[in-house]
Amino acid sequence: KAECIEGRSFGCEMRHGRPTVWVRNCRGNFRCAGHNRAVPCGFPPGQASYECHCDGSRRRAAPRLACPEARPSLNRSFASAADLGEWEGYLSFVYGLDTIQFPLHLSALHFFYRDRLPGRVLQSLQIIEAGSPCPIKSGDL
């Protein structure tokens, strides 16, 4: 369960003429202005986003987004630091080159800073966000 952050992963607004809580990749109990009871939203787990009406009427899940085609994006290996090329700056920033043991297989890494990835690498990836209902396979990001 991810932390709910107002304006980013949850919010309250009028939708379809009704006060509504929306959540994206989080869940919890929310209070709507003018309503005395908490509104559970994000349940049952499994959808990426939900809309929950503050009047307690039946919740409906927002439509699922299509999952990207699986592409093995990170199945690259490096025999030494000299082979890193465009990855050198990223790996140096995140890990420090002196801490990396070679050979290095990118598929062994499980977390990446999107804003630090090399430009050409980022353009070639199909990014799957944490909490997404899309399946993640080895080599996906």
Image: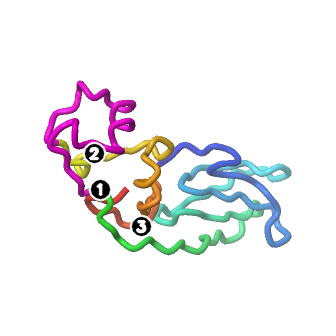
- Which residues make up the magenta segment? 75-103
Q: Earlier in the sequence, mark 2 or mark 3?
A: 2
Type of amino acid under label 1: Leu
Q: In the image shown, does 20 or 74 lie closer to the viewer? A: 74
Tell me the residue at 54%/61% (across/down): 43
Q: Is residue 139 left or right of residue 40?
A: left
Please name the amino acid that badge 2 sits on.
Leu
Q: Quadrant of residue 138?
A: bottom left
Mark with earlier residue (2, 1): 1
Q: Inspect the image, locate mark 3, and give the three-letter code of the amino acid beneath it.
A: Cys
From the viewer's perspective, is the residue at label 2 or at label 3 nearer?
A: 2
Q: For numbered disc 3, what is the local secondary structure?
A: loop
The image position of residue 122, as x and y in percent, is: 45, 54
Q: Residues within 10 Å of mark 2 (few under 14, many from 20)?
A: few
Q: Tell me the residue that label 2 is attached to.
A: 109
SS assignment at label 2: loop
Label 1: which secondary element: loop
Q: CA distance from mark 2 to mark 3?
A: 19 Å
* Distance in Å between CA atoms under marks 1 and 3: 17 Å
Q: Nearer the viewer, residue 141 or 63?
A: 141
Q: Which residue is mark 1?
A: 74
Which quarter of the rendering shows the C terminus? bottom left
Tags 2 and 1 touching, CB below 8 Å:
yes
